[in-house]
Image: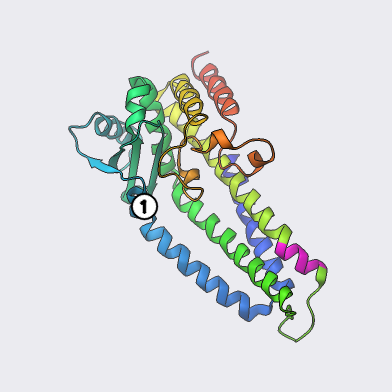
């Protein structure tokens, strides 16, 4: 069901992009911006993992590490290639996965994870991240980001064209003002909401797969509660809005409330915990 929802939302993103492309600017300008956006996202797809790991000052560990051994066991259970394992030097508990494919993946966790959580809770967190690798969520998020960035670029073009009296289609006709307003204001907001909806859907999937992988959904639920509680008091060093969706808990949870929750990359932690508790009842009665 979650996979179907993701496909539907991605299709809707594509429809929005095509609709505003046809409503404003003509084919040629849209095609140029599309090529630029695809180029940017192609670069991001191939190099985003190393960029993100450097942003967080992540340090690779080997088989002597406690985290490495847990990830190795989970990779074997999930029949996945062994990813690289990194530790992030901060007391703020969090974790994420990155990489363009299961064969080129990395899992990173903070020092705070190891200090705050017990072994089963850590396994739950890492199983969640391995699920992202298993379901190629990194690839999906890159494609979605590509659509969203193209829509944002078109909106910016429309805004500047409106300011300088442009906004004509390829036949020289003036653009529909309603379509222009929709392009500038409504389309980027709709694209952002769809992008975040897909991100939240993938988080639910990773929670369920992670709980099943370790056969202990409640361990992951406890971990989420502890990490979320900490995130309300301290922002993870190095965290940015562009990388927040990667973390198991939004590192900006403490400064997001009300209407801003509509634009959150993560579902409410309480709902995630409730689903994990329901999964535990399903698995163990």
Indicate the quadrant where residue 88 lies.
top left
Q: With 81 as the anchor, is 252 left or right in this view?
A: right
Q: Position of residue 63 (x, y in %)?
A: 19, 35
Q: Residue at x 36, y 31 (%)?
A: 91
Q: Which residues are magenta?
A: 178-184
Color style of the picture: rainbow
Q: Residue at x 33, y 41 (%)?
A: 80
The foreground one among 283 and 99 is 99
Structural crowding at the residue carrying mark 1, measured as other residues with C-alpha within 10 Å and reported as few (<14), some (14–19) or many (≥20): some
Q: Position of residue 245 (x, y in %)?
A: 50, 44
Q: With 96 as the anchor, is 282 left or right in this view?
A: right
Q: Which residue lies most toward the top here?
A: 285
Q: Residue at x 31, y 45 (%)?
A: 57
Question: Residue under circle 1?
Answer: 49
The foreground one among 123 and 80 is 123
Q: Is residue 185 above or below residue 53?
A: below
- Whether residue 45 appears in this view of the structure is yes
Give the main secondary structure, helix, strand or loop, of the magenta stretch: helix
Q: Position of residue 216 (x, y in %)?
A: 43, 20
Q: Position of residue 171 (x, y in %)?
A: 74, 86
**Which quarter of the rendering shows the N terminus?**
top right
Residue 223 lies in the magenta stretch: no
Q: Is residue 14 above or below residue 159?
A: above
Indicate the quadrant where residue 73 lies.
top left
The foreground one among 215 and 174 is 174
Task: Say what secondary structure mark 1 lies in.
Answer: helix
Q: Total of numbered circles in the picture?
A: 1
- Whether residue 83 appears in this view of the structure is no
Q: Is residue 280 above or below residue 81?
A: above
């Amino acid at each position: 069901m979650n996979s179907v929802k993701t496909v539907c939302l991605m299709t809707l993103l594509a429809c929005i992009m095509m609709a505003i492309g046809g409503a404003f600017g003509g084919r040629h300008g849209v095609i140029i911006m599309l090529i630029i956006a695809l180029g940017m996202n192609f670069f991001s797809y191939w190099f985003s993992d190393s960029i993100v790991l450097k942003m967080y000052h992540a340090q690779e560990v080997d088989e002597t590490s406690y985290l490495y051994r847990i990830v190795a066991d989970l990779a074997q259970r999930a029949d996945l290639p062994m990813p690289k394992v990194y530790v992030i030097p901060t007391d703020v508990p969090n974790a994420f996965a990155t990489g363009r494919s299961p064969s080129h993946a990395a899992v990173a966790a903070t020092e705070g994870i190891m200090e705050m959580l017990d072994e089963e809770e850590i396994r739950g967190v890492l199983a969640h991240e391995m699920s992202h690798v298993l379901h190629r969520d990194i690839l999906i998020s890159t494609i979605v980001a590509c659509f969203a960035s193209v829509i944002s670029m078109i909106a910016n073009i429309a805004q500047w064209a409106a300011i300088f009296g442009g906004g004509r289609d390829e036949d020289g006709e003036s653009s529909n003002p309603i379509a222009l307003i929709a392009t500038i204001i409504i389309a980027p907001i709709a694209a952002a909401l769809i992008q975040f909806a897909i991100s939240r859907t993938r988080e639910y999937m990773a929670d369920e797969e992670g709980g099943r992988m370790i056969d202990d959904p409640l361990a992951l639920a406890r971990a989420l509660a502890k990490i979320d509680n900490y995130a309300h008091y301290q922002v993870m060093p190095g965290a940015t809005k562009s990388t927040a969706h990667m973390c198991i808990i939004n590192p900006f949870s403490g400064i997001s409330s009300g209407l801003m929750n509509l634009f959150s990359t993560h579902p409410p932690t309480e709902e995630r915990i409730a689903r994990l508790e329901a999964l535990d009842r399903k698995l163990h009665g």
